[in-house]
Image: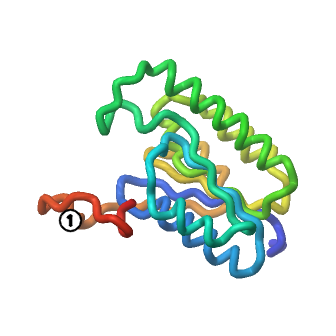
Amino acid sequence: MNSEKGLVILYTGEGKGKTTAALGLVLRAAGYNRKCLIVQFGKIWFTGELLGIKKLAPLVKIIQGGKGFVKILGDKLPLKEHKKAARETYKMLYAEVLSGKWDVVVADELVGAVSSNLLPLSKAVKLIKDKPDQVDLVLTGHHAPEKLVELADLATEMREIKHPFQKGFLAKKGIDF
């Protein structure tokens, strides 16, 4: 296989670490002067990666899209608002992937947007099939449909074995967000 061919990389599962793995991949790629874009679906709050990524500019850019996670963390928005935001984020992501400006694109929580019916599976499939050959595309999120696993060159399932939440610890700044 040609090492210059762009891969489709999928991080899924119930365990923590999907976004963290994707961001680690971006950090590595930036070390080789590769241009990286991260588009986050449903993440609208401050996280440490927002400021950290600014330090990697102009090689790395992050865009948050969506209206937050659906029906958790106090969400009271109608589902149609989340669907509209997911469609708008996808439209921007799709245009960026095809733009030729990026070597690596992370679609963070795109899989979650599909599994929670904010976006049809066909949109994720179209993104994979239409991406330029040299672009590495990373998809993250819970409950990846089997079709996405089939289309991926690399698929990793994160499985929780032990988590500090089980002992009542809240999310830790700099580790969880």
Res 157 quadrant in image? bottom left
Residue 146 visible in the snapshot: no
Q: Position of residue 24 (x, y in %)?
A: 55, 72
Residue 16 relative to residue 149: left or right: left
Residue wearing tag 1 = 164
Give SS at disc 1. Answer: helix
Image position of 29 with respect to 36: above or below: below
Residue 119 in the image: state x and y as whole percent: 58, 30
Q: What residue is at 58 percent from the left and 40 percent from the top?
A: 65
Q: Indicate the position of residue 63 as horizontal and vertical percent values.
A: 62, 49
Residue depicted at 87% across the width and 54% down the height: 100
Q: Quadrant of the C terminus?
A: bottom left
From the viewer's perspective, is residue 42 above or below residue 137? above
Q: Residue at x 51, y 67 (%)?
A: 21
Kindly tell me whether residue 171 is visible in this rendering: yes
Q: In the picture, which quadrant includes the N terminus?
A: bottom right
The kind of residue on which mark 1 rests is: Pro
Left or right: residue 8 versus residue 21 is right
Query: Vertically, is 31 above or below 95?
Result: below
Q: Looking at the image, is 111 positioned above or below residue 37? A: above
Which one is nearer the viewer's eye here, 103 or 2?
A: 103
Residue 22 image position (x, y, % from top left): 56, 64
Other-residue count near label 1 (Cα within 10 Å), few / some / many at <14 / 14–19 / ≥20: few
Snapshot colouring: rainbow
